Image (cartoon, helix red, strand yellow):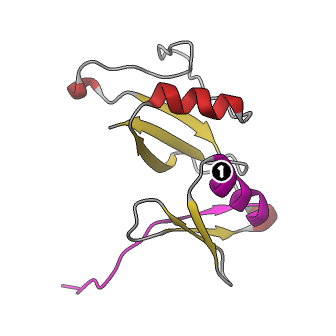
Amino acid sequence: MISVQQAFSSFSVDDLDAAEAFYRQVLGLEVRRTSMGLELDVTGGTPVFVYPKGPSHAPASHTVLNLVVADVGAAARDLAGRGVALERYDGTPHDADGVVRSDDPSQGPTIGWLLDPAGNTVALIEG
């Protein structure tokens, strides 16, 4: 068995400067630039690492980051004011803000999805 000392997740982007501006200025996260990429401080603990992949980058086919917020609708409206619209998926019931609402946690959370500048999916989950 291995002895894990630390763990962190990571994902790639095609433009590190655009990613830094998005995560810092649009989402308001703490971002630290390193010689290898970006560290996103999303919880005050272990960072999420974002690394440049350049032109060979392809957006992930899954959600790369889940951010728990107090009110997804308020977050969606704030982001819309910054020019970021939530994604809408066919066959999924969205409200006017683009949020999928749930009154039953066993059926899933109240959630909305947006894309970062590299096309990666970020989820906003009401907590």
Q: Mark 1 points at which residue?
A: 59
Q: How crowded is mark 1: few (under 14 residues within 10 Å), some or many (20 or more)?
A: some
Examine the rendered structure and indicate whether residue 109 appears above or below residue 37.
Answer: above
Examine the rendered structure and indicate whether residue 2 appears above or below residue 57.
Answer: below
Q: In screen coordinates, is 57 left or right of 104?
A: right
Q: Which residue lies furthest to the right in this view?
A: 55
Instruction: Give the percent coordinates (x, y) of residue 60.
Output: 59, 51
Instruction: Give the percent coordinates (x, y) of residue 44.
Output: 40, 66
Callout 1 secondary element: loop
The image quadrant of residue 33 is bottom right
Q: How many marks?
A: 1
Residue under the image location 70 percent in, 62 percent down: 20
Residue type indicated by callout 1: Pro
Residue under the image location 46 percent in, 69 percent down: 47
* Residue 76 part of the magenta segment: no
The image quadrant of residue 122 is top right
Task: Between residue 58 and residue 88, name the one nearer to us.
Answer: 88
Quarter of the figure that contains the N terminus:
bottom left
Quarter of the figure that contains the C terminus:
top left
Residue under the image location 56 percent in, 12 percent down: 96
Task: Between residue 106 and residue 32, name the one nearer to us.
Answer: 32
Examine the rendered structure and indicate whether residue 20 appears above or below residue 85.
Answer: below
Residue under the image location 48 percent in, 17 percent down: 92
Q: Which residue lies furthest to the left in this view?
A: 1
Instruction: Give the percent coordinates (x, y) of residue 10.
Output: 52, 66
Instruction: Give the percent coordinates (x, y) of residue 24.
Output: 65, 57
Q: What stretch is highlighted in magenta?
A: 1-26
Task: Between residue 20 and residue 94, name the one nearer to us.
Answer: 20
* Residue 21 part of the magenta segment: yes
